[in-house]
Image (tube, grey):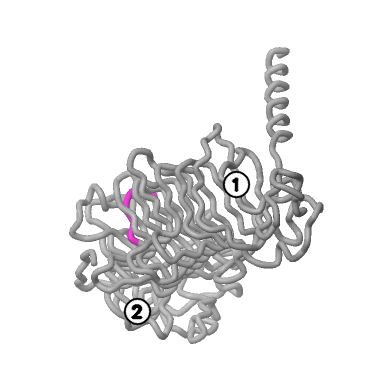
Amino acid sequence: MKRVLLTILALLVLSVSAQVQAANHYVRIGSTNNGDGTSWANAVGAGQPGAFNALPATLTRGDTYYLSDGSYGSYTFNDAVSGSTYIYLKKATASSHGTEVGWSSSYGDGVATFGNLTFTTSYWDIDGIEGSSNSGHLIKVDTTAGDACIMSNCSYIRFTHVEFDANGQDDEDIIYANSVSTQSTNLYFGYCYMHDCGRCQFLFRNTSDSTIEYGWFEKNHWDGVVHAEGISAYSGNTGNIIVRHNTWVDISGTGTLMIAGDGWEIYGNLMYWTGGQKTNAHSDCAIGNWGGKDQGTFGSSDTKIYNNTICDISTGNAGIYMYSGESGNVAYNNLWVNNYAVGLSNITQSNNTTSGSTSLFTDYSGDDFTLTQATDEGKGDLGSPYNVDMSGNTRGSDGWWDRGAYEYGSGGGGASETYKGCGGSFSFGGS
C-alpha cells in the first residue's frame, strides 16, 4: 500500500511540475521591437520584456501563444515532439487574452491571418476561439498559391473556429493530408469554415481516427479536368473517420464525400446546392466509393450513414454508391429532396426518404432546412451519439425520430412513406 501511495504521489508531483513549467506567450503584430513574449507591452528593445512582434520560428512544447490581430504570413510547424505534449495557438479576445499587462482591446477585435501552413510534426492545437457556420472566425488561413494546409506523416492536430479561404485557385486542396511513411491519426476540425477551393476541402491518404464536425464547407472547383470532391479519401489505411453535423454547399465533382477504408461514420450532415450553382453540379453520388477502381484501395466496410439531408443536386446521382461485396455498410433515416436522381447501391438501408417535399422545410428558398413538420418515421434505436441533431435537439424525445439532419421538435407522425429506396441504373466513374 505504501508503495502504491508513493507512486501516486510521484505522478502528482510530475503532473504539477508540468503545469508549472507551461507558460503563456504574447504575439502582437505591429510591436516596434521584438520582445521576449512575456506581456502585450511594446518592448524597449529586442529580447526585452514585452510582446513578440511575430510568431517565433521555434515554439515551446506545453506553452500557449496568444495571437493579436494582424498578418502572420506562412508558417511551418516543425518543433520536435515531446511525448504527447501539445503546443497551443489561441486568438486573443477581450474575454480571453492571458495577462492584462500591456493589453489593449484593439489587439483582439479583428482576425489573425496566416498564409500557407505546413505541419511536419504532431501535437498542435490551433483555436480561433470564436466563429461558427460561415462567419465570425478569428483565425484565418488565406492562400493564393498552393494547398492551404499540408500535413505530412503527422498526427494529433486540432483546428477549432478557423476559416480557410483558397480564393478559387485551380487544382489545389485546403487540407492536404497525404502521409506516405507514417499514418496520420487524430486530426480534428471543429466549427471550421472552408471555401472557394480549387479541388478538395479534404484530401486524405493514409489517414484515420479523425473527426470533422460542425463545419461549413462551401464551393470547390470541378470542370471535368480537375478531379474534385468535398472529401477525397482512398487507401486501405484510411478510415475510422467521423463526419457529423456539417453543412456542405455547392460541392462539385465525383461526389460530396468520396470515402475509402473502414469504419466511417457520416451523420447529421446537410448537403445542398444554391440556386445560382445548381446547373454546374456534377455527381456520381453524394456519398460513396469510386467505381471502376481497385476495391482494396477504394472500398469501405462498416460505414454508418445516418440522418443526412441532401437537396438540389441537379445532375447525376445524389444517392449512395458503395462497392459490392463489402460488409456492414448501412444507411438509415436519410432525407433526399429535389434531386435529379437518387440511387442507393450495395448498402443495407431502411427508413430513408428519396423523394421528399420542399414543404418540409422552414424556408426552402432561403436555405433554411429545419423542419416545419415531422417526416416519415425514422429508425429510432440508433442510440448515442446519433440521437442528437446539429442544433443540439435530442432525436425521438417526443416519441418520433425524424429523418434528415434536423429533428422536428413537436413530434407527431408524417404521411405514409412512398419511397424507401430508389432503383435505376447509374454510371459511377471517377471524373
Residue at which label 2 appears: 339
- Graded by Cα atoms within 10 Å as few (under 14), some (14 to 19) or many (20 or more), the crowding at tag 2 reads many
Q: Residue at x 28, y 59 (%)?
A: 289
Q: Amino acid at mark 2?
A: Asn
Q: Amino acid at mark 1?
A: Pro
Residue 63 located within the stretch drawn in magenta = no
Rendering coords of residue 373 (x, y %) = 54, 79
Q: Is residue 7 left or right of residue 196?
A: right
How many numbered marks have been drawn onto this rendered protein structure? 2
Name which residue lies at 38% across and 71% down: 251
Q: Main secondary structure of the magenta part?
A: loop
Quadrant location of residue 237? Answer: top left
80 or 231: nearer the viewer: 80
The quadrant of the image that shows the N terminus is top right
Residue 281 point in image, percent of width and height: 32, 77
- Say which label, 1 or 2, has the lower sequence index: 1
Find the magenta span and give its range: 258-263
Q: Position of residue 415 (x, y in %)?
A: 45, 80
Q: Position of residue 376 (x, y in %)?
A: 45, 74
- Give the residue displayed 55% in from the left and 81% down from the top: 372
In the picture as drawn, the residue positioned furthest to the front comes out as 45
Query: Badges 1 and 2: C-beta atoms under 8 Å apart?
Result: no
Q: Which mark is residue 56?
A: 1
| Residue 304: assigned label | none
188 over 246 or under it: above or below:
above
Q: CA distance from mark 1 to mark 2?
A: 50 Å
Is residue 388 something that shows in the picture? Answer: no
Residue depicted at 63% across the width and 63% down the height: 70
Q: Quadrant of residue 362?
A: bottom right
